[in-house]
Amino acid sequence: MRTISENRCFGGVQGVYAHKSDATDCEMTFGLFLPAEAEEEQVPVLWYLSGLTCTHENAMTKAGAQKWAAEAGIALVFPDTSPRGDGVADDPAYDLGKGAGFYVNATEAPWAPHYRMWDYITDDLPRVLFSAFPLAEDAQSITGHSMGGHGALTIAMSFPGRFRSVSAFAPIAHPTASDWGRKQLGAYLGPDAAKWAPHDATLLMRKRGFDGPVLVDQGGSDQFLDLLKPEALAEAMAASRQNGTFRIQKGYDHSYFFVSTFMESHVAFHADALLA
Ligand SMILES: N[C@@H](CCC(=O)N[C@@H](CS)C(=O)NCC(=O)O)C(=O)O
């Protein structure tokens, strides 16, 4: 692992690090905010998974999460959204290939050799983080925006007991029924829709739900509402009697202005679970 930068931030440190990933078989970059408490003890950790076109940098610089995480004494992890590098397959469309890993392990050509973001987030990066930094493995929560909200919800529901709470900002909520999903899951996992189901938050919510609290915020004026399909997830949460809250935020769009507006509330929600 190598350090790209470390900057003092709200009494803690905002770092950017790169490491060779076994999962994606390329160098990966991530951001990690450590609050001041990390100088003395292990701290709880909140994962933030980003959306389409993002790198580790978008949320780190635009979501405004560090202030609230510093106040709560919580670390923030900002992973990249896909494998990177010259030898990595890509597509001219912004919603496939680099910047659009969709948090799955691709099985299909040309994606299979590097597009293993599920393993990267759930296995590879945790191993790096918990061995190199003072992070409490038994105090993790996860959130994300758009494609990252999809990743946060599907990963949280697939690893019962690992995350104490999950939240999402405008998640891609029902990808098996959306052009933000069918195209990518088809490309990465092949045409058999049965293989897509474990990567659909609405289907997972109907089937098993999440064992802790869930918080979802969705902008009422989001330009991608037709692709995100929030109503499917809201219905599934109600049908499975999920402990949680689904909020429509009137007038807000899909941008980081929306994410940063509600970040304080999401960090407070996770702090309740992480510091209990
Ligand atoms: N830019 C794309 C939309 C992609 C988009 O809105 N990405 C969101 C996540 S799904 C994002 O966070 N973009 C980066 C940013 O706002 O910093 C388009 O051409 O329609």
Image (cartoon, rainbow, N blue to C red):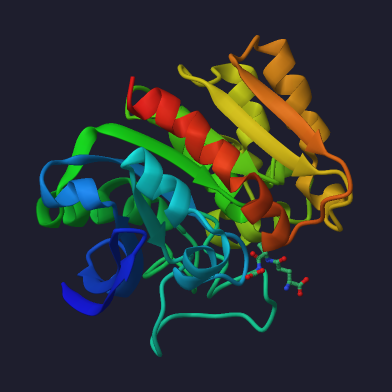
**Whole-percent x and y of residue 72?**
37, 39
* Quadrant of the frame with the C terminus: top left
Find ligand 1 in the image and state its quadrant. bottom right
**Whole-percent x and y of residue 77?**
36, 55
* Quadrant of the frame with the N terminus: bottom left
Q: Examine the rendered structure and indicate whether residue 146 appears above or below residue 206.
A: below
- In the displayed structure image, the side of residue 25 where residue 102 appears, left or right: right
* Foreground of the two, 220 or 147: 220
Can residue 116 be seen from the camera position used here?
A: no
Q: Examine the rendered structure and indicate whether residue 87 appears above or below residue 146.
A: below
- In the displayed structure image, the side of residue 109 where residue 22 appears, left or right: left
* Foreground of the two, 180 or 253: 253
Q: Residue at x 35, y 28 (%)?
A: 274
**Whole-percent x and y of residue 103?**
49, 53
**Whole-percent x and y of residue 41?**
12, 41
Q: Residue at x 61, y 62 (%)?
A: 187
